[in-house]
Each structure stands twice: as structure tokens, then as C-alpha cells.
Image: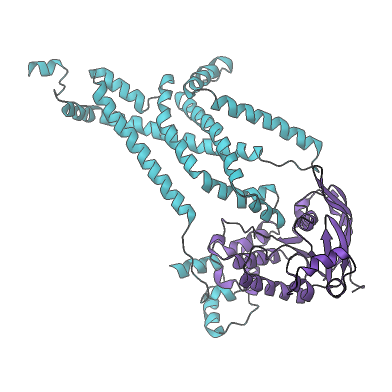
Amino acid sequence: MSDKKEIIEIKHLGKTFGKNEVLKDINFSIKEGDVTCIIGASGSGKSTMLRCINLLETPTSGEILFKGNDITKEKNVAAYRAKVGMCFQSFNLFSNMTALKNCMVGPMKVLKKSKQEAEQDALFFLTKVGMAPFIKAKPKQLSGGQQQRVAIARALAMHPDVLLFDEPTSALDPQMVGEVLEVMKTLAKEGLTMIIVTHEMAFARDVSNHVVYMQDGVIWEEGTPQEIFGDPQRQETKDFLSRFINM
Amino acid sequence: MNSFLLAGSLPPDFFGRILFILKNYGVSMAKGAGTTLLIAIVGTLIGCVIGFIVGLIQTIPVNPNDSVGKKILLKIVNIILKIYVEVFRGTPMMVQAMFLHYGAMLLLNLHMDMWTSAFVIVSINTGAYMAETVRGGIFSVPLSQTEGAKAIGMNHVQTMLNVILPQALRNIMPQIGNNLIINIKDTCVLSCIGVVELFFTSKSVAGTYYTYFETFTITMVMYLIMTLFFSWLLRFFEKRMDGPAEYDLATTDTLAYTSGTLSDPRKDFVDDRHLSDTSRTGEDNLNNTRR
């Protein structure tokens, strides 16, 4: 693992909303091919941190290095975002487009691919997430799990260097959670770099190789799944994990 | 018989007089209605374009990383647009018509003919209303749509054109319809600068025989027919924009295998199809299967 290059380095990241300090001096790094799960209670700043990485939130202080460049000072934010995919808790599919068009519009408009190329690519990824039969459906005609799988295909169609997941299964019922996690497992096996904010402890334990525990805007503990789930060092981590008895 | 001729050969009963007016002045009234429609439709269309441009500029987000020049320029442009919207929303169109038609002549020595004046006035008046409507329409699209677009690397213009505006347009269609219908009715104020539209024609016809009630009964019906027709037409467009309520599964569609990365169980069959139309895009295929 040590021979892999660091793709994202977060240094002294801070974020405040008014007087509310949401993130305090966050430091950690992601290597290429890492599957990082960020766990912690709601309101601990997990999602805010993920959104800072994609610059959907502007960090108040600190640096985020993407392949060595500080992207918090980046002028062309759109070009950076094109390399960092994101899947949302509420899917955020474009409701005016079919599933196929959702996956084509980014490659066509942002990457300037031809319609044919974009379509082939979109179909490849939609097939991969098992959504090929539904290419003509509009988002509102699909179930939550199906929408999330299309959203993953949409992100993949941009050929991102890193894929961010913001609680991708929190709005889904157990069966749909399964189908989305299945897709994410496949991606992890293929070596895609992923940062996943999740409450699915079993997934974090079995699929990731890097787990970060956050509480009150601070990283309390990080390490391999074996370290965090098997032998947590901090009392806070133990308390949090003790609530997931059946994992 | 004699009195009948003295009254300018007007029939004695109400419906008879209506028929008489229709027979003698129906064509000029229809022409007036045509003028009304032309001004209303063109004015609404240009007004929509103005409204979209103004509404779009007003919703450009300011990023902390933007240069000072861009921030100042945006601020100035926004103030000008705000003044435009408030002035033309806050004064009667009839007054605007007088002000612009005669004002342009005196102040700018610009002699606009009645048609130009009419189109300009209805357009900028509608534009002022539409600007606010478009702003509302853009805000009506959930923020999650903007975030989804940003997350795949779209810039502001791409996000607006591909994701936000198509949805905003659908949401403000009822209001656009409202504006068109208001314009059909309100073009009658342009008679004050001499535009010969339906109201102007009706007034002339009514004055000739002193048949105000009869003539304006016809005028009422004509306006009503026009507005009813366009409210129906716009409803029809709205339904078209919503698209089909159902979708077809593409399980048996060869399209699912065009990526060429998967082996298709019906390979021979598919290959035949593909040889004959390799240049076809997937969308054509989709349409074909639907037909």
C-alpha cells in the first residue's frame, strides 16, 4: 500500500457556518485505489467534509491537495469537479432526462465527447450497474435503488479519478441497500478510488481498506477496518460502534 | 321600410344588427383581431426571451474566488436590470405606450412607426414580468439538481442550459400562458397610439352606426375565442413537455449491447442488424422500437 501515490491530501481543513464550527483541523490522506469509509454519528461533519473535497462547500481554512495541487485556490472549479465524481444521498438525477441521457450529458457537454461515444460509454456503465433495461425511464419512474445505480453510472461515465459517496444508501430500504452496495463492492474490487460516507458498518468492515471515525468535526481515529472494528483505541469509537451489535 | 333606410339600413332587432355588422365589418374586425394576435404573440415571445436573459443574469452566483472586476460588473448590471423590472412592472402599459412612442420621437428623434412601437412596448413590458417569473422558475428547481450538475463538472452556463432551464421552463409554462392571454387582452391599450387592433376597429365600427352593444358583443366573443384557444393550446404544450407517462423496458432491445464489451447471447441476430445500420444512433433505434 505504501508504494501507491497519494491522490488527495487534506491539511488542517476547517469549515464554519456562521459561528458553528463544523470541521476542526481535519488531516488525512487518500492513496490511489483506496476505499475509504468515513463513519460517525449524524452531525459529526462527515458529509460536510466530503462536500468540501468536491468544493460543493467552500472550506473556511486549510488545504485540499489533489495530486499535489491545492484545489481550494483553484479558479476552474468545474474542471476539477469533472475528475471527482459524486453520488448523493438523494441521488440528484436530472429529472428532465431519461436514465441514458443522465449518463450522457456530462461526457458530451463537459468532456466534449461525440454523441455516439457518450452513448456507448453510458450504456456500458448502465449495463454494469444492472440498469440497461431502464435506459428510457425518467428518474421519477424508478425506485430509489435504481435511481442510485443510475447515479453511480452517471458518475462513472465521467471516468473520475476519485468517486465520492455521500450516504448513498441512507434513503433506501434494506433490499435496495443490497443492490447498491453490490455495485459499490464491484467497483472497489476493480480498484476505483472511493471515499464513502456511510452508516453501513458491515460494508465498511468488509469492503474498505481505510476507515475514518469522525465525531464533532474531528477525526478521532483512523486505520484499517481490522484496527477500527476489531480493536478501537478510543472510548468514543468504542461507544459509537457498540450501537451496531448485529453487524 | 322608410324608417329602416333612415336608420342606415340597420335591421330593427338585436341579432339582425349583429348579423349586419358581421356582414359589413366582419372582415375588418377579423383583421383587427389578427393585429391583436400578432402583437400579443410576437410581444410575448420576445418578452420571454428578454425575461429569460434578465432572469438568468440575475441568478448568476458570485463565487468568493471570482475577480473583483467581475463582482463589480455583475453588481452594476443587476442594479440596472432591477430598475428595468421595477419601472416597467410598476407603470401602466398605456402610459408606457404614450411615453415611449412620443418620447422616442421628441428625445431621440426616433420615429418609430406604430408597429415597431407596439412590438417594443409589449415586449419590454412582458419582459419585465417574465424576468421575475423566470427567477421564480429557476428557484423552483431543487438545489439538488444544481449540485448534481456541478458534481459532474458542469459550469454555470451548462448547468442552466441543460438541467435548470428545461425544468424551470416547464414550471413556468402556466405563467407564460397567463402572460400571453393578458397580452391578447391588453394590446387594446395600444389603440391610444393608433394601432388598429381589435378594440380600435370595434370602436370605429360601433361609432359608425351607434351600435355599441351589438359591436362589443361581437368583440367580447372574439376576444374570448382567442384566449380560450390559446389556453387550450398551452395546456396541450404542457402535456407534450411532460413526455409519456410510461416507458418501455429495453430488455429485448439490441441497443443494450451496442457498447460491444459484452457478449450478446443473440450475437448472430444482432450482427445482422448492426451491419445494416451502423451509423444509426441509439436514439433512432429507440424511436424505431417505439413505432
- The N terminus of chain B - image quarter: top left
Indicate the position of residue B211 as horizontal and vertical percent values.
Answer: 23, 21
Q: Nearer the viewer, residue A204 or B46?
A: A204
Q: Chain A's colour?
A: purple
In-image side of B40 versus A118 (left or right): left
Q: Nearer the viewer, residue B132 or A178?
A: A178
- The C terminus of chain B - image quarter: bottom left
Indicate the position of residue B78 as horizontal and vertical percent values.
Answer: 68, 32
Q: Residue furthest left?
A: B1
Q: Residue furthest right?
A: A2
Query: Looking at the image, which residue is at 56% across and 31% down?
Result: B128
Q: How many marks do you count on the picture? A: 0
Indicate the position of residue A32 as horizontal and vertical percent values.
Answer: 84, 69
Residue B51, placed above or below residue A138: above
Indicate the position of residue B228 as horizontal and vertical percent values.
Answer: 35, 40
Q: Quadrant of residue B281?
A: bottom right
The colouring scheme, among rainbow, by chain, secondary structure or one colour, is by chain
Q: Nearer the viewer, residue A50 or B171?
A: A50
Residue B220 visible, this orientation: yes
Q: Nearer the viewer, residue B251 or B29?
A: B251
Query: Looking at the image, which residue is at 70% across and 66% down?
Result: A156
Letter of the cyan chain? B
Q: Quadrant of residue A123?
A: bottom right
Residue A191 visible, this orientation: no
Residue A78, placed above or below residue B22: below
Q: Quadrant of residue B131?
A: top right
Query: Looking at the image, which residue is at 76% across and 37% down?
Result: B70
